[in-house]
Amino acid sequence: MTQRRMFVACLCACLLLCVGGSWLGCAPPVPENEIRVTIVEGSDPYAAIQEALIKAKSGKIVVLPEGKFSLDRSLSLTVDGVTVRGQGMDKTVLSFKNQKVEDNKKEGAQGLRVQASGVVLEDFAIEDTQGDAIKVEDADGITFRKIRVEWTKGPDKSNGSYGLYPVKSKRVLIEDCVAIAASDAGIYVGQSEEIIVRRNRAENNVAGIEIENSKNADVYDNIATKNTGGILVFDLPKLPTNGKGTRVFKNMVFGNNTANFAPEGAIVGNVPKGVGVMVLSTDSVEIFENDIKDNQTANVLIVNYEFAVGKYEDTTFDPYPEGIYIHDNKFANGGYDPSGKDFELLVALIGKPLPDVIYDGIFDEKKQVDGKTPAELMLCFKNNGTGTFVNLHAYKTIPEPNKDPKPHECELPALKSIDFDKNP
C-alpha cells in the first residue's frame, strides 16, 4: 500500500511538469494575482462576478470566463488598482436584456459602475443595459481596452444613454473599443482631464464620440460612421469644467446620417443628422489629418451654443467657440442633402451641396481689439485640399454667408499631445 501511494504521488508530480510551455494532464495553477470567476450552468452569474469584484484587492485581476451570461442587476467596483479581464469582446458577453429597473429609474441601471482609480477594463462586452453600459466616476487613471458596448436591436430611443461613460476623471484611456446604438453617445468623456481616445469604432449612436467640458484630449485613429453626428466636442452650461485643448486627428468620419433618436429633452437631440465633426462652444480645438466624407448635412460644423441650442442662464458660461484650427484634412461629398429647417434656409441662400466646413461666425464683441478678433481666438482653415468653407455671419439680423476662405487662411500654434500613456 505504501509503494502504491508513492507511485500515485510520483505520477501526479510528473503530470504537473511543464514541458515546452504546456501542462501535461493537469490544469496550470492560478497565478496569485488572479481571481478566476467560475460560472456553471444554472448558477447566478451576477452573484459570481459581483463576489469577485468585492473580494478583489488592489493589483488583482478578475478573470471572466468565455460565454454569454444574463445578468439582471448592475455590477459595481469600488477598489482601486483592479483589472477586469474577459476572453475577448465577442467571447465574454454580459447581457443585461433582462435587467430589473426600479420605478423606471433607467439612469441608475448601468451594466458596470466603477468608483475607483487605476482600474483596467478589457476584453469583454456589455449588451442591452437599461441605462448606461459602463459608467466611471472620479477616477484617477481608467483604461477601457477592447471593450464592446452595444444595444443589439439597433438605434432606438429606449436604449441606454451612454456606452463608455467616464466622467469627472483624470488620465482616461479608451482604445480598441466598439460602441453601438447608444441613445446619446457611444463613447463619452465628460468633465475630465488628460484623455486619449484612439483606434475605436463608434457606429449607429446619436453621437459617436463626444468630448464634453473636458481639458486636454487626443482623439485619433478612430472610425465614426452611421451615427447622427460622428465626433462632437462640446461645452455645455451649468457644468463646473470648461473645455479646452482637444485634438481630433487621423480619424475616418464618414456616412454619419442616422436619424436622431435621442429621447426628448437630451441636448444631443439638437444635433442634425448628417454631421461629421461638430464643435459647440468650446475653445482650442485642432482638427487635422482626418478623412471626413459623405455626411449629408455638414462634414464639419462650428457653432455657438445660442445659435445651435438656445438661451442659457449660466452667467459663467462662454458660448463662443474660439481658437479653432482646421488643417490638412481630406473632405468629400458633404452637405449633399442637409437636414433641418436652418439648413434648408441656408440651401435657399447659397445652394447645395453645402460647404464642407460651416461656421456660424458669431464672435464675442467684448474680446474684439480694434474691431477685430485677436489672432489666437480665430477660426483658421488651411491646407484642406479641395475642402470648402462658409462663414454664415449669423450674428447679423439677416445672415450673410460668405464662402471665401481667405479671411480664415491663418495658422494657430499646434496643441500639445497627450502622452500620459507611454504605450501607443
Image (tube, helix red, strand yellow):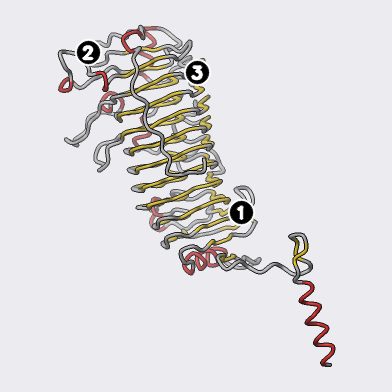
Please report whichever mark, 3 or 1, sits nearer to the chain's N-terminal start: 1
At 48% from the left and 60% from the top, the residue drawn is 82
As displayed, is residue 174 above or below residue 413? below
Residue in front for this viewpoint, 121 or 72: 121
Q: Nearer the viewer, mark 3 or mark 1?
A: 3
In-image side of 194 versus 98 (left or right): left
In-image side of 92 versus 121 (left or right): right
Whole-number angstrom distance, CA of label 1 to CA of label 2: 56 Å
Q: Which residue is mark 2?
A: 396
At 80% from the left and 87% from the top, the residue drawn is 5
Please report whichever mark, 1 or 2, sits nearer to the chain's N-terminal start: 1
Whole-number angstrom distance, CA of label 2 to CA of label 3: 31 Å
Q: Nearer the viewer, mark 1 or mark 2?
A: 1
The residue carrying pointer 1 sits among few (fewer than 14), some (14 to 19) or many (20 or more) residues within 10 Å by Cα, namely many
In-image side of 388 versus 235 (left or right): right
Whole-number angstrom distance, CA of label 3 to CA of label 1: 38 Å
At 51% from the left and 52% from the top, the residue drawn is 121
Q: Secondary structure at mark 1?
A: strand
Q: On residue 48, which mark appears? A: none
Q: Secondary structure at mark 2?
A: loop
Q: Which residue is mark 3?
A: 330
Q: Amino acid at mark 2?
A: Lys
Residue in front for this viewpoint, 97 or 167: 167
Q: Quadrant of residue 346?
A: top left
Furthest-bottom residue in this view: 1
Please report whichever mark, 2 or 3, sits nearer to the chain's N-terminal start: 3
